[in-house]
Amino acid sequence: MTLAVLAASGILAVAGPAPSAQAASAPDFGPNVKIFDTRTPVDEINAYLRSISAEPEFSGNRHAVYFKPGTYGSAAGQDNPATATGIVNSEVGYYTSIAGLGASPTSVRINGALHSEPRQNADGSSDGLTNFYRSLANLSINPIQRPVGADAQRARPEGVAPAHTMRWATSQASSLRRVDIRGDLDLNGAYGATLFGTVMADSRVSGTVNSGGDAGPGQAQYYVRDSQIGGWRGGSANLVFSGVRGAPASDLTGRGITTLATTPVSRPAPFLTVTGDEYAVVVPKARTDAAGVNWGAAGTTLPISRFHIAKPGTDTAAGINAALAAGKHLILTPGIYRLNGPIRVTRPGTVVMGMGYATLAPTGGRAAIEVGDVKGVVLSSLLVDASPGTDVLVKVGTGGATGIGDATDPTTLSDLFVRIGGAQAGSTRTALRIDQSRVILDDSWLWRADHGTGVGWTSNTSDTGLVVNGTDVTALGLFVEHHQKNQVVWNGERGRTIFYQSEFPYDPPNQAAWTDGTREGYASYQVSPRVTTHAATGTAIYTLFLDSTFAGAPVRAWTSIEAPRRGSVRFTSMTTAVIAFGGGIRHIVNDTGAAVDATRPNQVVPGFAAAARLAAYPG
């Protein structure tokens, strides 16, 4: 989500003294990867982190930062952050991933804070609605946070935090994975901020998580899975917990909370490790009915020698595909890859892992990734930018085979983010298509941009964000926004979604331009009439109809979810809302559920013009 319009209306560098033998033998990850060890002075770590923290939203720069096992910073000031010195303390900016290199998050301990702060607006409000594309993973943080840089000079700095508290005030594409917060975690702003949150997985927070939103600004939505928390404070439109020890009880009508005891199937994202001077990638196995963290879970350790390490501007599609065909896995180091063809995955069990929001920007309307009819593929930590005239940007399976997929070794897409427009001109018919069975989608944001380069109703065109044709596909943390027809089309049997967040397109110029036959607009989430079994829980679907409102005739959608009327096709914990401006949604599922309309405001969800909830369909 953005709502920006509302807010506005190389060479591996190892810091420290002389490089050690370990540093000298590290793989060549290129100039956009920084690896610290415990000999690096804290001031040097902070200087580097702050130097990359101010990238603009559509920057072409990408950064990955890693910490070798050990302790960084001093804990001496943990009870009084205002006087703390010697801490690792920096904001985390766009296109930056920061991770530990240990076998467990507890192998790397940060005394300090790696934080993300909302921006302050001229009207005195704060928001992080465009705080995208940043992440933390596989490290432990003893929170000691202070404001930094220009923020520290403000009369009301955003970066202030109570003792033992770190802030992560972000919106989509900013995951927390395998993070151990030894204190409190604030997902809101110091003074309250409007945010449209993200995913936390395989993480532990010993204190309380604060999302705000129930008494002032805060996170509109968040998905937490397979984790452990000391408590949760806040509520809003859609907070979903699956397999989270310490999660709050379900409370849809009051706080927008949906809690499941377990996650039916999940697979943690792969991660980079180092032991001595030996680098490797750990690929965890899938879990069923998971609850709580399991950092020692079974998996496969792949030595770095089994990877082709690609670099932007050097590697070609042909070269990458030749390496994959020869049996290599793939690491895409930080940068933008303007390839003249798709990356083709044709061998089962292949791992394709990005660093620092590595971005595939194929030219000439070509696809970015094509996975063949092979099982057990893992795609992780990738950003895809469309060029004009694309048919399908990311394809999993060809559609020409059946029975491809494995419950014990499912193809998994973790932190896959697709963007149409914004960074560059682009268009597509479908952002992501799944033609394989038993695939897991784990944190996907499929975004038709509403601001930036090449944005307009007839410019960055895109029919649909996600089309699922495979059977037994599971989506965990699915964000799909602003496409011009259905956001999601689900044709496969026994599909399952846990947490769905969507916005209709902001920019239909009028109702005639946005009509599905004789019906007003398109349902956001459509399940094919042929499907006999489907389940989704924790859905939030919003409107912000700007262009038609400004034209004086705001559009409406006939419903938010369209699905067969069968008892085995079931939806639970649904929310619809008008964020602001005109128009609305007539129903929640098919012709069931209350309408939301800008002309009839309410306070069902504080901060939204109008909202409605539906506990279950069929009722």
Image (cartoon, rainbow, N blue to C red):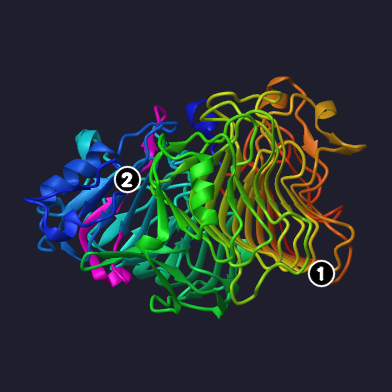
**First reached walking from the N terminus: tag 1 or tag 2:** 2
Q: Position of residue 242 (x, y in %)?
A: 56, 71
In magenta stretch: residue 112: yes
Checking the image for residue 533, the label placed there is 1
Q: What residue does disc 2 label? A: 92
Is residue 534 left or right of 106 when viewed as pictured? right
Q: Which residues are magenta?
A: 100-123
Is residue 286 left or right of 551 when viewed as pictured? left
Q: Residue furthest top?
A: 551
Q: Position of residue 547 (x, y in %)?
A: 68, 24
Separation of marks 1 and 2 at Cα, in angstroms:
42 Å
Is residue 85 left or right of 328 when viewed as pictured? left
Residue at the location (59% across, 38% down)?
341
Residue at the location (46% across, 54% down)?
330
Task: Pick whichever, 78 or 523, lies toward us.
Answer: 523
What kind of residue is marked 2? Val
What kind of residue is marked 1? Thr
Q: Position of residue 60 (x, y in %)?
A: 41, 32
Q: Can residue 73 be seen here?
A: no
